[in-house]
Image (cartoon, rainbow, N blue to C red):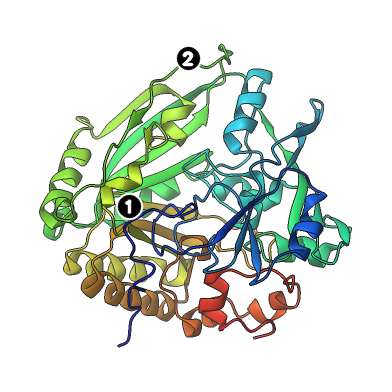
Amino acid sequence: MSHPVIDPQAAKTAPPAFESWGRYPRYDAKIVPLNWQNDFPGVLAGLNNGALPVGLGRSYGDVCLLKGGNLLQTTGMDRLIDFDPATGVLTAESGVSLAQVLDFAVPRGFFLPVTPGTKYVTLGGAIANDIHGKNHEAVGSFGNHVPSFELLRSDGSRRICSPTENPDWYAATIGGMGLTGLIAWAQLRLRPIVSRKIDYEGIQFHGIDEFLDLKQRYRHAEYSVSWVDCASTGKNFARGIYMLGEHAKDPDKLRPSPEPKLVFPFNAPGFALNHATVSLFNSVFFHKQIKPHVKQVVDYEPFFYPLDKILHWNRMYGKRGLVQFQYAIPWQNAKEGTIAILREIAKSGLASFLAVLKAFGEIPSLGTMSFPQPGIMLALDFPIKPDLTFPLLQRLGDMTLEFGGRLYSAKDAAMTPKQFQAFYPQCQQFARFRDPMLTSSFWERVTGGESTL
């Protein structure tokens, strides 16, 4: 079976000016800062080789890259425009980060409706990838909480998009990977809170059956996610910790306490991450929770963003970087597919210590190309070992397809065109909304650059 070959240009050890969080692939591109909404059409008019709006580069693969093209970095468009405390609706430019939103909202008694595992994501990036969080079963994905936004096109046209105004453009842009145009500003419906604290529970489980039992028992929990050991076999196969959270109901101070940041200071050597070290880490992580079931009150920062306190943690995967594999398999095949894929991962010897297992709920996403679907989601990182990693990713992608699932474009670096078009048959409908001036290395890879497929 064929698999991706590392592009010599992509394998450079010198870091580029802009890279994805996986640090693979690595492509040269011209960085063009956007500081004002009205800069967009004029900037595009002077460019060749295509362009792509990008934010903070927390996507893992090449969805935020454009080899030899122009990356329109939106982080200068970071202004808060309006806030209505009666409805919780915040209006902000698309380059504002979720960290900035939290700094504004939490002291006022509000929180993000949906958040990924890092707060260093822009508002526009969160919409473009229709991010999801630990509360998908309760509230759906990010786009479900975006009442409207303004979309700028390369021809200078502007569209207000909402479920009732230009609804087709609204659906194409949510989860549209930044290819439909530039999101100038967006509304976000925040949720009220009375405390920074999270009432947390951690429960050990052994195997997928116990995971599913816990999911059913705690089906009304607002936040739920599991760490799963994907290295162990035998009696420890698919053991993990089921983690639950609710916003504390007792009023508490909403001002943050300064928390020191740690820095991963260097690229770890390639031999540091191997099956033995990952297995050891997983055993320690599982047993660090001394009791099978613990309850405690924690700040929201370590609950939602445990890795944000370690700056540049992606360096632990070494100079070659990492790739992430993330699937959603529908309920009818979820148990069988998850067990089969976890066994394939354990057998490969490329197990990850950052493996997340959770359930997606029934609330439909609003985006044409959105990733979530009801069922089980698994996400994990692999170090890049060319002769092992990419053949494994091809097998896992084919297995995901066999079980009726799909992979997440925002985390992908290896999906084939055949897989992509099977996972997302709606891509032909979506392609009609792509701005002719915008493309990405991901889009070129999975479609051959065809505008209409």
Q: Label 1 is placed on what type of residue?
A: Ala
Question: Which residue corresponds to mark 2?
Answer: 257
Which percent across, then down, holds residue 289? 23, 32
Question: Which residue corresponds to mark 1?
Answer: 355
Q: Is residue 369 left or right of residue 219?
A: right
Give residue 449's quadrant in the image: bottom right
Residues at marks 2 and 1, CA–CA distance in whole angstroms: 29 Å
Q: Is residue 259 left or right of residue 444?
A: left
Q: Nearer the viewer, residue 409 or 157?
A: 157
* Name of the residue lying farthest toward the front: 46
Which percent across, then down, holds residue 110? 66, 26
Q: Residue at x 38, y 54 (%)?
A: 212
Which percent across, then down, holds residue 4? 35, 78
For the N terminus, the quadrant is bottom left
Q: Nearer the viewer, residue 398 or 95?
A: 95
Q: Residue at x 22, y 75 (%)?
A: 387
> Does residue 141 appear anywhere in the picture?
no
> Does residue 231 appear anywhere in the picture?
yes
Q: Is residue 72 left or right of residue 445?
A: right
Callout 1: few (<14), some (14-19), or many (20+) C-alpha neighbours within 10 Å?
A: many
For the C terminus, the quadrant is bottom right
Give residue 6's quadrant in the image: bottom left
Q: Is residue 400 above or below residue 195?
A: below
Q: Is residue 352 above or below residue 227?
A: below
Give residue 263's quadrant in the image: top left
Q: Residue at x 64, y 18 (%)?
A: 107
Callout 2: few (<14), some (14-19), or many (20+) C-alpha neighbours within 10 Å?
A: few
